[in-house]
């Protein structure tokens, strides 16, 4: 049997995937890239979390849920962490749960693209839909990101190769620029390659804005090669619709000025008569949704502290920083592997806490957890809505039954909340 599916391998959420299913197993995945196919096939992996575990011992789901509720209820300072790999409905339940246990709600968004998503929303900027980019953008800039490695189908589905209404020749109708600190695979498809030293993104954005508004600076101020820079500027001036897709490279050295500089540049482009927009290239499939759900429920994007009853927020108090100080005694981790990705100090704080892992795989964090609640694979075994990098909400189309004792994130969260 052939079924249609939405891939949750990255924030592009490709909705043209076809999966051949036979006897409840995936036989073939069509149209997906290698990352997407791996995600879909992960439902079959040996490293799958299939049974609830407490202290390494298999227990019933009811028992594990009761224990999770008890740990959260008795926690002095609980952290509820993850959410970027969960559907919007689960994020909403997570926020309610955090409120109920006076916990701290956060996830990778606080050290990733959360700030840029929030910054754009604060300024009232809504990104264009990817279909509009396909139809109309004649200059695409990849800045501090490398989709050839991270979002394989970005260029072929939307931004570079396909033919659109105002880009009838596809790649021939578009200019492609890549800005990065080193040569990347994405540069192979670029007309302009701007290599800058780390941390010079804001300087480059300012330099480009200056060129467009008539106040010339020196390319050396941003550390960019002169010839490449001016050839890019000429091409930019001939463009009618510029879209900048940006990655974490813009945050080099932990600076946010790169993101702010980029949005200033977008304003300058617009005032010079060129239509322009910027879209963050988040990796996790629902980081945009997680931030938007948090904003709509509390007015804050991430790092939301419910310990005083009412939600509060400080950009300086993220889960990573507070874990480094050993602040949390119980941590519920959902769809994330902080032991494998956080800095050393935060990891040692996490190791001192009791961890409840809700995950479809036995990640490093799940293996070290006190309690494991096996989750269904989002988009494969469980549905709900997720928000694409451009803000488009898509309904996932699960096509397999959850394996073993696994359950959808929402179901697990509802069961725990009921026990509280
Ligand atoms: S580009 Fe992303 S969403 Fe599309 S198939 Fe690949 S991993 Fe999946």
Image: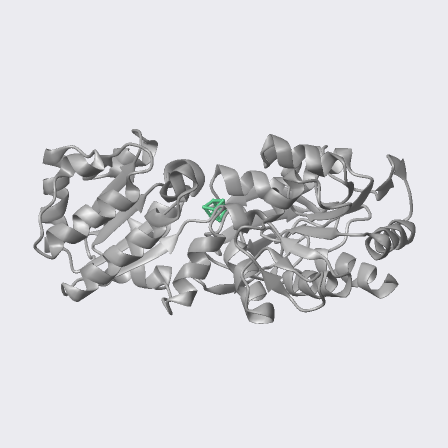
Q: How many marks?
A: 0
Taking the spot 18% from the left edge, 37% from the top edge, the residue there is 221
Q: At x 58% / y 52%, what residue is drawn?
A: 84
| Near-viewer residue (405 or 52) | 52
Q: Residue 86: image x %, image y %?
A: 63, 54
The location of residue 69, given as percent across then percent down, is 85, 56
Is 309 above or below relative to 60?
below
Q: Is residue 411 left or right of residue 225?
A: right
Considering only vertical position in the picture, is 268 above or below 71? below
Q: Is residue 259 placed above or below 51 in the rendered structure? A: below
Residue 178 location, x and y as percent?
Answer: 27, 40
Left or right of residue 99: residue 112: left
Q: Quadrant where the C terminus lies?
A: bottom right
Residue 198 in picture, x, y percent from top left: 33, 34
The residue under the point 87% across, 49% down is 64
Left or right, 405 with reference to 340: right
Asked if residue 164 shows in the view, the reply is: no
Chosen colour scheme: one colour
Q: Is residue 369 visible?
A: yes
| In front of the other: 395 or 106 | 106
The residue under the point 19% across, 35% down is 224
């Amino acid at each position: 049997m052939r079924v249609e599916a939405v891939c949750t391998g990255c924030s592009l959420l490709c909705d043209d995937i076809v999966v051949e299913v036979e006897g409840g197993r995936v036989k073939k995945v069509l149209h997906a890239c290698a990352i997407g196919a791996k995600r879909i096939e992960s439902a079959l992996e040996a490293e799958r979390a299939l049974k609830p575990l407490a202290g390494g011992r298999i227990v019933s789901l009811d028992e594990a849920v009761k224990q999770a509720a008890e740990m959260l209820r008795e926690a002095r300072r609980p952290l509820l962490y993850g959410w970027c790999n969960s559907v919007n409905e689960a994020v909403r339940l997570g926020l309610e749960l955090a409120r109920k246990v006076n916990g701290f709600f956060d996830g990778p968004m606080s050290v990733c693209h959360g700030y840029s998503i929030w910054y754009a929303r604060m300024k009232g900027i809504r990104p264009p839909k990817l279909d509009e980019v396909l139809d109309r953008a004649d200059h695409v800039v990849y800045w501090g990101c490398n989709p050839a490695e991270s979002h394989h189908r970005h260029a072929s589905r939307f931004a570079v190769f396909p033919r659109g209404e105002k880009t009838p020749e596809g790649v021939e109708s578009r200019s492609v620029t890549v800005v990065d600190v080193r040569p990347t695979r994405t540069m192979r498809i670029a007309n302009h390659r701007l290599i800058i030293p780390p941390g010079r993104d804001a300087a480059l954005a300012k330099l480009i804005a200056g060129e467009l508004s008539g106040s010339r600076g020196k390319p050396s101020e941003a550390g960019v090669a002169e010839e490449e820079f001016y050839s890019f500027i000429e091409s930019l001036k001939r463009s009618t619709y510029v879209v900048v897709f940006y990655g974490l490279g813009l945050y080099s050295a932990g600076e946010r000025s790169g993101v702010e500089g980029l949005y200033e540049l977008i304003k300058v482009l617009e005032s010079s008569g060129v239509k322009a927009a910027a879209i963050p290239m988040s990796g996790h499939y629902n980081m945009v949704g997680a931030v938007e759900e948090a904003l709509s429920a509390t007015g804050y994007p991430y790092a939301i502290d419910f310990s005083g009853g009412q939600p509060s927020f400080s950009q300086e108090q993220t889960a990573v920083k507070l874990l480094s100080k050993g602040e949390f005694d119980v941590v519920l981790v959902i769809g994330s592997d902080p032991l494998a990705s956080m800095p050393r100090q935060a990891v040692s704080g996490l190791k001192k806490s009791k961890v409840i892992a809700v995950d479809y795989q036995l990640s490093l964090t799940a293996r070290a957890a006190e309690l494991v609640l096996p989750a269904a694979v989002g988009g494969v075994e469980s549905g709900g809505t997720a928000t694409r990098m451009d803000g488009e909400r898509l309904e996932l189309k699960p096509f397999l039954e959850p394996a073993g004792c696994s359950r959808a994130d929402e179901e697990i969260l509802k069961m725990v909340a009921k026990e509280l």
